[in-house]
Amino acid sequence: MILINPKSTKFGIFQRYVPLSVPIGVGYLAGYLLENGRKAEVIDEHIDPLSRQVLSRLLEKLSPPYIFGISTLTACAQRSYEIAGQIKHWYPDSAIILGGIHPTVLPEEALENTAVDFVVRGEGEGILLELCDAIKNRRDCSGIKGLSYKSGGKLIHNPPAELPVLDSFPPFPYHLFENGLGKYNFSFISSSRGCPYECIFCSQRSISGKRFRYVSEEVVLGEIGLLINKYNQGHINFVDDNFTADKQRVISLCRGMIERGFQKKATFDCQTRADAVDDEVLLSLKSAGFRMINYGLETASERLMVLLNKKETVAENIAAVQLTKKHGFGVSGTFIFGLPTETKKDRWQAYKLAKELDLDYVRFNNATPYPGTKLYEIAKNEGRLFVEEGWANLNACASLVQDSLAESKLPYFPEGCEEKELKKDIIRANLLFSLRPIKVFKLLIRRIGPAGWFYLPPKWYLNPKEWWGLIKLGASLLRSLAKIYL
């Protein structure tokens, strides 16, 4: 089977300075297939643009019927459909499968594309294994849970599959991406899946469910050792949605990291919630070499926090940030502008809060009604869902990364707010916070911001191309700043 990660351009003018992430989703799928004795190859369009020559080279290792799986986020849905059409044209007898958040919540849309044969809904490892065997052996698919497909001119949606037990999963197959060393950011670990909360802006629950499941501690420690000792990673980010949800589990993991001396060789970041930290947890994280914690702060308005359904308060966020800084951590945070009923005053309260808390890094995103979220339903019901062809404008950081206020329409902005005004507020908040000399100095000296946000190569200051790139980025940001005052 060939698994494909479509190219995304969501970071626009920042693309050069955003670390290229290993495609975690297709990586886990490939690793699971290989662990179970099946053949799997991976194409990441960020490294190898799709072409018939690339496919032909990989297909020499496989036998027909050929099976292709395409990972599909909303932001790259149009590209996924284009890829499906190209492959079906080149290999008409192949089976094409789409998986990921977008086809999970909109399987009918995916199957309306004549090139798409199957949709895997939810976490796909076990479903994909069953489906590959059924295709290869030309067996009936009606008993495969979590599968949607076409049969007799009708769309069939089999019952949902149970969420897999992560203890049975192999370690992440980092070796599959070694050809991208020097291009990829290898410094990540996913040690859990799931989240019981139902924030109105998050579509991840459609994939990972509403309960926490954990990778075994030994596997996680083994992956850390691999990243440090084989791939020479001096900084590692845990990409879990809520890393400290199980406090005793985190304390035990930190103890294992300290016993192996990992804190002497690397530093670590994580993301969590305000109600999932206390002195004991933060002391354990500090001892294990964690240097920065990211919180989804979202807003400074208690009214909007209730609307977001986060099940925590602004006061709890403030207390958690202050406690985290007390223990010597860096703190980064994200906020959302353009929420239902939000006012300009609400937005600037959020900006002031970020400054008062003296956060190290902040990103102010635009509210984005991804399919599968409550915000999507709110936007539809209000008649304020503005989706461009191919979902091209569904990008939470669009207002910041686009080099024009008029480049793309926001997918949602609240009643009583002008779209251009909201875009200006988002740009102004991001640039005024991040272009302060002390923040720029920290980024240039440390080279690394919060994982996935900003990265400069080692000794970048010795490379004239890096200076030129930074000058162009700075000029673009200054143009954006000038526009909002015109």
Image (cartoon, rainbow, N blue to C red):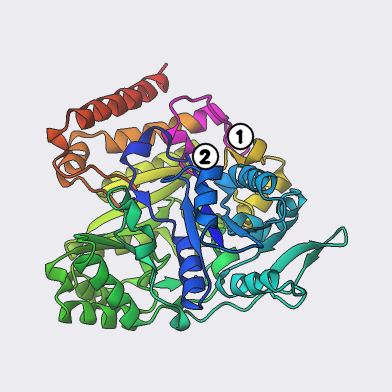
Q: For numbered disc 2, what is the local secondary structure?
A: loop
Total residue callouts = 2
- As drawn, 193 above or below 186: below
- The residue at 16%/45% (across/down) is 458
Residue 141 screen position, x and y as percent: 75, 73
Q: Looking at this view, is 300 or 57 the one in front?
A: 57
Task: Find residue 97 and report its horizontal and vertical position in percent.
Answer: 65, 59
Residue lying at 17% horizontally and 78% vertically, measured from the top left: 258
Predominant SS along the magenta part: loop
SS for callout 1 = loop
In what quadrant of the picture does the C terminus appear? top left
Residue sitting nearer the eye, 285 or 54: 54
Q: Position of residue 229 (x, y in %)?
A: 19, 68
Image side of residue 448 versus residue 348, left or right: left
Which of the labelled discs sits on residue 343, or is there none? 2
Q: Nearer the viewer, residue 34 or 329?
A: 34
User: Is 282 within the magenta?
Assistant: no
Which residue in the structure is indicated by mark 1? 416
Q: What range of the chain is rendered magenta?
A: 396-422
Q: Nearer the viewer, residue 313 or 156?
A: 156
Contact check, label 1 and label 2, Cβ < 8 Å: yes
